């Protein structure tokens, strides 16, 4: 197997194969994150049956593609399929045949339905047929491992994992496949013989978000900067149109989702629901609620409470680096080259915002370095309510052990230097936060610097230091 990382996910797959009961596994995660690759590699492409849904085709075409797979895996029925009930009946007949392909070690029959949401076209009866197939047949076969997979994360969550009907309590295992961590990105580059240092690994994550498919498009003869230009800025680049394709593949009507992402990308600390309504002009109601939930389920945004603010309103914040990059850098295609963009004031603003997302997505590693892995915490941003003071903290780690880490994050090529003015600024932030929030918790100033922190007469104010190597711990 040529699988980078994914240790816990491989353990789930191994548990399914070694189980003594029927297993129904749901695998989900955003487009291009490597779901199909993981399943194919783990089982070495050896399935008892495999079929995939096809995007943007109707029920008739979906059934035709499914029937092609049935014939490939041993069905002798040549008449065209008319219903999904017939399709699953033929699948059942294949699974009951003697001598069919099974897992060589466990003897399990492995069925893999890829891109399942695309199979379920409107009024097709797909879910009812799948429900009947599993409940009347699959759930009685101890030798069966039934795997469904889809990039339309909301569909899997709402219609499979969260279903209150026929699938209720039927899913035995689930895998939410996340983007690579920085360490997994580094391992991926090494596996593909792409020579990069850790600064460039972080930069690639800030642009591509740890998505294996995107990283797999790198030309190892080019630098990271050249690959960014080639893939995203050249009109024939393989990812030039990826942003629109990403959303259209996940949502049938992505207009509202795109509006929300555009506005949220302009506000690093996030926005409240009221602010989203004001800026997007999307009416308050079910459509907005559904769009926000779907964006959160796909991993593009996170929903969090800011405990320094009065009231119970939540904030919504972009946590997908690629989405942020497309909205901040590629918007309206005003920038013709990454090389020309790098070093500009807009570039440095993007770097600051994007590196904050890198840190937010590596809270587990940060807490491990701080020695607080077992301590519950909440991460959020804070901005002073006083216009004159103007203090802002991009990330707080509010801990249950009566401490708060006030995190400052800096993405630089050289060790970061705290001068007298920045020292005063840090003191000012801490005092404002203490005064306005009335917290009695211990406040620990924490610097997270990609190139480390240079010690001098002003750095003694810092309680904890974290550098790039710390973010790469496995």
Image: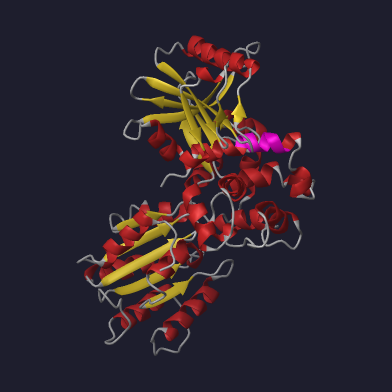
How many numbered tags mark residues here? 0
| Residue 138 to residue 461: above or below | below
Q: 74 or 120, which lies in front?
A: 74
The part of the image, by quadrant, that contains residue 83 is bottom left
Q: Is residue 166 visible?
A: no
Residue at the left extreme of this rendering:
20
| Residue 186 to residue 129: above or below | above
Q: Magenta stretch mostly in which secondary structure?
A: helix
Question: Residue 439, position in %: x, y?
Answer: 43, 13
Question: Residue 335, position in %: x, y?
Answer: 78, 46
* Membership of 13 in magenta stretch: no
Residue at the front extreme of this rendering:
456
> What is the span of residues highlighted in magenta in the rendered image?
347-353
| Residue 232 to residue 323: above or below | below
Quadrant for the N terminus, please: bottom left
- At 43% from the left edge and 86% from the top edge, which residue is drawn? 71
Q: 89 or 462, which lies in front?
A: 462
Report the side of 7 relative to 314 (left or right): left
Q: Is residue 26 visible?
A: yes
- At 76% from the left edge and 37% from the top edge, which residue is drawn? 344
């Amino acid at each position: 197997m040529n699988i980078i990382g994914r240790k816990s996910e491989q353990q789930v797959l191994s548990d399914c194969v070694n189980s003594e009961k029927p297993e129904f596994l749901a695998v989900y995660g955003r487009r291009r994150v490597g779901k199909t690759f993981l399943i194919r590699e783990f089982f070495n492409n050896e399935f008892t049956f495999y079929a995939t849904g096809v995007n943007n085709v109707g029920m008739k075409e979906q059934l035709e593609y499914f029937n092609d797979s049935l014939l490939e895996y041993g069905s002798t029925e040549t008449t065209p399929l008319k219903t999904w009930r017939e399709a699953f009946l033929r699948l059942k007949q294949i699974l009951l045949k003697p001598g069919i392909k099974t897992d060589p070690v466990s003897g399990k029959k492995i069925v893999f339905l890829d891109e399942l949401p695309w199979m379920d076209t409107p009024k097709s009866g797909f879910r009812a047929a799948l429900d009947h197939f599993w409940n009347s047949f699959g759930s009685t076969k101890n030798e069966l491992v039934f795997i469904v997979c889809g990039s339309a994360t909301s569909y899997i969550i709402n219609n499979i994992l969260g279903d209150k009907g026929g699938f209720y309590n039927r899913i035995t295992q689930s895998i939410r496949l996340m983007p690579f961590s920085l360490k997994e990105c580094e391992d991926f580059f090494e596996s593909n013989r792409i020579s990069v240092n850790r600064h460039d690994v972080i930069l690639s994550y800030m642009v591509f978000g740890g998505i294996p498919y995107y990283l797999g498009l790198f030309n190892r003869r080019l630098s990271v900067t050249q690959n960014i230009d080639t893939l995203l800025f050249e009109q024939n680049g393989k990812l030039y149109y990826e942003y629109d394709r990403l959303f259209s593949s996940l949502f049938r009507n992505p207009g509202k989702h795109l509006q929300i992402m555009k506005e949220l990308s302009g506000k690093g600390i996030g926005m409240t629901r009221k602010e989203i309504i004001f800026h997007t002009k999307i009416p308050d109601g079910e459509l907005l609620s559904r769009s926000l939930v779907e964006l959160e389920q796909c991993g593009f945004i996170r929903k969090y409470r800011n405990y320094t603010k009065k009231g119970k309103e939540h904030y919504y914040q972009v946590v997908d680096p690629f989405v942020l990059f497309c909205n901040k850098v590629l918007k309206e295609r005003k920038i013709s080259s990454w090389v020309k963009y790098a070093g500009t004031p807009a570039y440095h603003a993007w770097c600051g915002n994007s590196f904050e997302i890198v840190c937010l997505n590596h809270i587990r590693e940060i807490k491990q370095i701080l020695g607080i892995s077992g301590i519950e915490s909440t991460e959020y941003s804070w901005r002073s309510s006083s216009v004159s003071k103007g203090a802002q903290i991009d990330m707080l780690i509010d801990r249950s052990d009566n401490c708060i880490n006030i995190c400052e994050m800096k993405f630089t090529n050289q060790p970061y230097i705290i001068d007298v003015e920045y020292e005063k600024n840090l003191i000012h932030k801490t005092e404002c936060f203490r005064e306005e929030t009335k917290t009695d918790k211990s406040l620990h100033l924490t610097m997270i610097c990609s190139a480390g922190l240079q010690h001098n007469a002003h750095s003694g104010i810092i309680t904890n230091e974290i550098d790039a190597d710390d973010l790469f711990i496995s």
